[in-house]
Image (cartoon, rainbow, N blue to C red):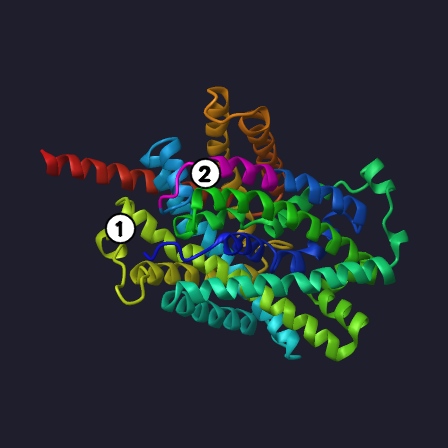
Amino acid sequence: MKKNEYGLFTAIGMIVGIVIGSGIFFKSDNILIATNGSISLGVIVFCIAAVGIIFGSLTISELASRDCKAGGIITYAENSYNSSVACAFGWFHTFLYYPSLIAVVSWVSGIYICMLFGIDGGLTLHTSIGFGAIIIFYILNILSARLGGYFQNLSTVIKIIPLILIAIAGIFFGDPKSVSMNEIVHMKSATWIAAIAPIAFSFDGWIIATSIGHEIRDSKRNLPKALVVAPLFILAIYVLYFIGISVLIGPEKVMALGDAHVDLAANTLFGPWGAKMVLTFVVVSILGTVNGLVMGHIRLPYSLALRGMFPKSEKIKIIDDKLGMPVNSAIVSFIISVVCLLIHFITQKYSLLPNSDISEISITINYVMYILLYVKVFKMGMNNEVKGLWKGKINPILATVGSLIILFGSISNPLFMQYTFICGIVLVSAVLFWRYKEKSNIMVDL
């Protein structure tokens, strides 16, 4: 694997580029539905859900500053506990977390591309376009890690433009009276807790930057900086956009139109041609998210194979001399992502996950797993390995509370228990696989 391909801006760009890119555009209606149209309550839930992300990234940054070995979260789990736990983290991210995000976001890219070109496409067309996007970005990242990084930087800058424009327009041309504080005081919506799941989706992706940590220049300094700066910036942008879009066209219309509310807002502000430009920015933004996810997922089988934690590790960890990339790892990653896209298609076609998708439960389980790492940082704080009250104690405690809040907000998902069972099977399989490998190695040594 080529070293030092990426700088601090790319690391920040990867986090901002993955997190901002799709969720905020197609989850705003889900959030308002959960809060019964209350904008102010939506903002409060944004801040509540952000606790897990902001303090989670601050806590993980302590582990990132201590090791820049390939694998990111796998490395942190291995150093914090043991190889069995690391293998479980790696398999979960490889087989469920990353590919479910890639599947959902690529499908969303199909929705907005159809909007951009005025195509009345359905689920099949949207999914087919998403499949094409997956193919393109896997090829791009296999051919050149640097090209993938350049596209990530470009898309990050572009995607902030429509968010800021709509936020400003909402403040000047919207109806500020629609933001009422009464809902916060009385918490009139009994279903507001359900808004945490789509907000968690909108915020998710910050951890993926750790997968390229070993390729970031001066990783022990730059990666922690990126993990601290990016989530705070994202929260500010999200809250401004959510308020702007809601007061501009009204929460009722946002809920009624679903994903199409962005198109209405753009047309209202800029007319048909201006709307096309804004939608173009949105499409590039979402494609940037797909690219960032692919950048991270390609390296996961490789990182596991380096440790012997993946089937056929000897083949998976081979680096192509000309491309400087683990091509076999990328192929495995591609196949898993396509399978997840098919599963997502089935769940949407038969309405198995109303007002939700397969990625939300993966995100929730992921945050529950992070608690293991937060506990490790807390122990390091108690032993003075991490200096300071905030860094070593308060940050990991608040990160843990945030993860539990996200878990509580996702339990209402109709397939939560079934999907959690599937997650459990993957995690147990990973542990059993590693123990089998260890036993085999011992037998060979004997």
Disc 1 designates what residue? 311
**How many numbered badges does the structure rendering display?**
2
Q: Position of residue 28 (x, y in %)?
A: 70, 56
Tell me residue 240's x, y (percent).
75, 53
Q: Is residue 337 visible?
A: yes
Q: Which residue is mark 2?
A: 65
Front one among 154 and 18: 154
Q: Residue furthest right?
A: 177
The magenta segment is: 52-69
Per the image, label 1 sits on a secondary structure element best described as loop
Mark 2 and 1 residues: CB-CB less than 8 Å, in contact? no
Visible residue check, residue 345: no
* Quadrant for the N terminus in the image: bottom left
Is residue 216 shown left or right of residue 255? left
Q: Toward the viewer: 301 or 423? A: 301
Residue depicted at 49% across the width and 70% down the height: 133
Instruction: Say which amino acid is labelled 2.
Output: Ser
Q: CA distance from mark 2 to mark 1?
A: 30 Å
x 37%, y 52%: residue: 300
Crowdedness near tag 2: few (<14), some (14–19) or many (≥20) residues, C-alpha within 10 Å: some
Q: Is residue 60 magenta?
A: yes
Give the residue displayed 30% in from the left and 38% down from the top: 432
As drawn, 186 above or below 9:
above
Q: Is residue 92 left or right of residue 433?
A: right
Asked if residue 138 lies left or right of residue 175, the reply is left
Numbered circle sitting on residue 170: none
Q: Amino acid at mark 1?
A: Pro
| Label 2 secondary element | loop
Q: Earlier in the sequence, mark 2 or mark 1?
A: 2
